[in-house]
Amino acid sequence: MTPATTEPQIDPDAPAIDVNDLHKSFGDHEVLKGIDFHVDNGEVVCVVGPSGSGKSTLLRCVNLLEAPTSGTIFVEGVEITDPDIDVDKIRSRIGMVFQSFNLFPHLTVLGNLTIAQQRVKKRSKSEAAQIARKNLEKVGIPEKEAAYPAHLSGGQQQRVAIARALSMDPDMMLFDEPTSALDPELVGDVLAVMKNLANEGMTMMVVTHEMGFAREVGDKLVFMDDGLILEEGVPSAVLANPKHERTQTFLSKVL
Amino acid sequence: MAMSPRKRARLWRLVQYGVLLVLVVLVVLLSDLRQLQLQFFDIGTITPMFPDVITIALKNTVLYTACGFTFGLALGLVLALMRLSSVGPYRWIATGFIEFFRGLPALVVFIALSIGVPTAFPGREIPGDELGIATLALGLVGGAYMAETIRAGIQAVPKGQMEAARSLGMPQARAMRSIVVPQAFRIILPPLTNELILLTKDSSLVYLLGYTIATVELASFGREILNQEKNMTSLVVISLCYLLITVPLSIVVRRLEAKAERAR
């Protein structure tokens, strides 16, 4: 927007997300205590851990919904912690899915999917609608485009939220406990959509409690506790053979 | 005496109806209906009031109110955004302004603008004659009230809405305009309409500015006829005219609320 911001130069060979020695405090409370974290292009990384471990904060730092206290974050080779960077440009390349959906209640499903395309990507109304319909098809609810979010089930709302993020053609997707607010019988539909997305090669960072999803779809599992990454590796290996005592305790409770 | 709660409730309801009936009968018997009709519904007073009461007085009331409300709404939105600003001085100015004008009777603002300003700055006057002053006065008073309403509405929109908009790449101002403010306005539609109804009534203060047959509004028009005819009928007529504005407004709001409820 302002001429002072530098146009980010994407490096296609750089990792999708590269976090170095990230610290984040809320007042006196240190939530992240030095995180090194890495997501390669096309990789699906699942972050698990007890509540309050800082996993959501880590995810929210990646698109700067939370400002890091110290440390650096690179997204596709661009340092987004550089104060001169155009945050909006970065964010439009990172799709975000929230636990509470956060659909825009005053807009129809189609409106939810087109508004940012038109306002940010400057697409024409018809082009935006076309892309929106393609993505609604993809998440399996093409018939709901005229409905308002309030008339959809939680599972449908979350799938609309995924389609909304996809309509911006993101290079990667962040999921912040996408199924935690859903009734158990609706979780499967959302996970199926995410699995398809992973199979298409989408780069994904998923904060979740769904160990089955992590094992089946994830390329890497990261276990966080008390603001630190305690353990990471191939999901099946970490789940079968947790090395750290706290990982063992946590997994024995959730599995 | 033992009586079941349901029977007791029924008896109590009957007593309430009975009391009401007795009161109505008493009022009808004791009042002089002929005199009432002459004083409050005198056809000879009503007929000459038309069409001017509609084409001039009602029209002017609506005009003053609409202009004041529009200006007040714009002012209120600016003040609300200033109140929410991260820049301290903006917040302080807005807070001071709001507290000042909320604390003043509308009458004082009208006096200040119509008599005070020309006295303090001789040779200068507020442009737009009565309409200009009315717009400014009603807007200042209404804007101060609406600012707090709008601020509360913006804060009532969940934080996740702004986050979702920002994470789609919308700049702050765009997210405000396209996502937060439209939702805030749905929330505050009922209190804003209340404000519009209040301003409709405050527009009667325009009488202070003096009036001609072209600029008269409902209240002054009614008083003028009252003075001529020595008869309450004119006030009944203009009261109904005020209701003609406010009752449809209430109905529209109820419809909009129902619609917003469905979309929620």
Image (spheres, helix red, strand yellow):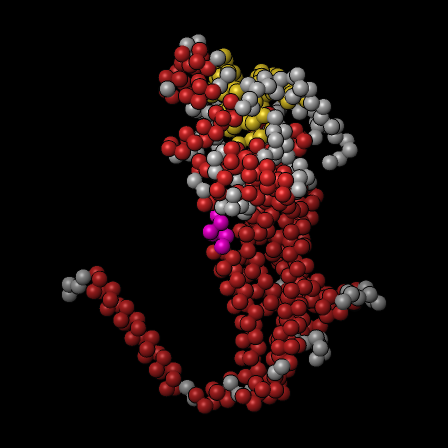
Relative to A100, residue A151 above or below: below
- The residue depicted at 49 percent of the width and 60 percent of the height is B254
- Location of residue A65 (image quadrant): top right
Q: Quadrant of residue B58?
A: bottom right
Q: Position of residue B250 (x, y in %)?
A: 51, 64
B137 vs A240, nearest the viewer? A240
Q: Residue at x 41, y 21 (%)?
A: A212
Magenta stretch in the rendered image: B259-264
Residue B181 coordinates in the image, percent (x, y): 60, 47
Q: Give how far across and how far down residue A62 sits, in percent.
A: 59, 25
Residue B115 shows in the view = no
Q: Is residue B263 part of the magenta span, yes or no?
A: yes
Q: Is residue A90 magenta?
A: no
Outermost residue toward the left in this view: B1
Quarter location, residue A92: top right
Residue B141 screen position, x and y as percent: 64, 60
